Amino acid sequence: MDKTAENLVKETCKWLEKIKNLDYEIKEEYKNIKSNIEAYIKDAEHFLNKKMYIEAFESVVWAWAWIEISEYLGIAKIKR
């Protein structure tokens, strides 16, 4: 594995762990957003297993984006 791949795996795993331990709540009427977040998390894990490191990193970034955008719009609350 080259250095770029190592860094992608390291960062993806770091952010996957953080997102899995993140305590957040999304309003019930927006449960489809929570489904999207969960799908991106599963995609990231799938791509890691397939050694598709760019796609894995992109997926975890999208999961985070959905959470942060939802919080910004008042749809989600992150418990800090």
Image (cartoon, helix red, strand yellow):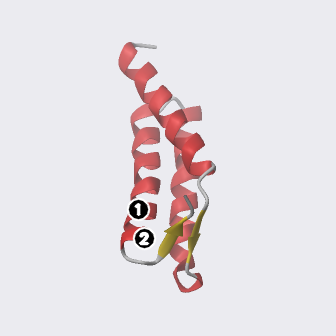
Tell me if mark 2 has few (under 14), some (14-19) or many (20+) residues whose alpha carbon lies within 10 angstroms of its own. Answer: many
Is 8 on the left or on the right of 28, as rendered?
left
Whole-angstrom CA distance, mark 2 to mark 1, is: 5 Å
For image coordinates 43% across by 39% down, the residue present is 57
Q: Residue furthest top?
A: 2
Element type where label 1 sits in the image: helix
Residue beneath the point at 59% across and 33% down: 49
In the displayed structure, 8 sits above or below 78; it is: above
* Residue 68 numbered tag: 1
| Location of mark 2 (residue) | 70
Q: Position of residue 2 (x, y in %)?
A: 40, 13
Q: Identify the residue shown where x is 59% and y is 41%.
A: 17
Identity of the amino acid at label 2?
Ser
Please tell me whether residue 36 is drawn above or below residue 31 in the rendered image: above
Question: How far across and down, in percent of the image, does residue 53 sit?
Answer: 45, 32
In this orientation, which residue lies closer to the viewer: 25 or 56?
25
Q: Residue at x 57, y 68 (%)?
A: 35
In front of the other: 10 or 71: 71
In the rendering, which numbered label is found on residue 51? none
> Where in the figure is residue 5, as x and y percent of width and height?
41, 22
Are discs 2 and 1 less than 8 Å apart at CB? Answer: yes
Give amino acid for label 1.
Answer: Glu
Can you tell which quarter of the image residue 25 is in?
bottom right
Which residue is nearer to you in this view: 33 or 17?
17
Where's residue 46, x and y in %? 58, 42
Figure check: 23 above or below 18: below
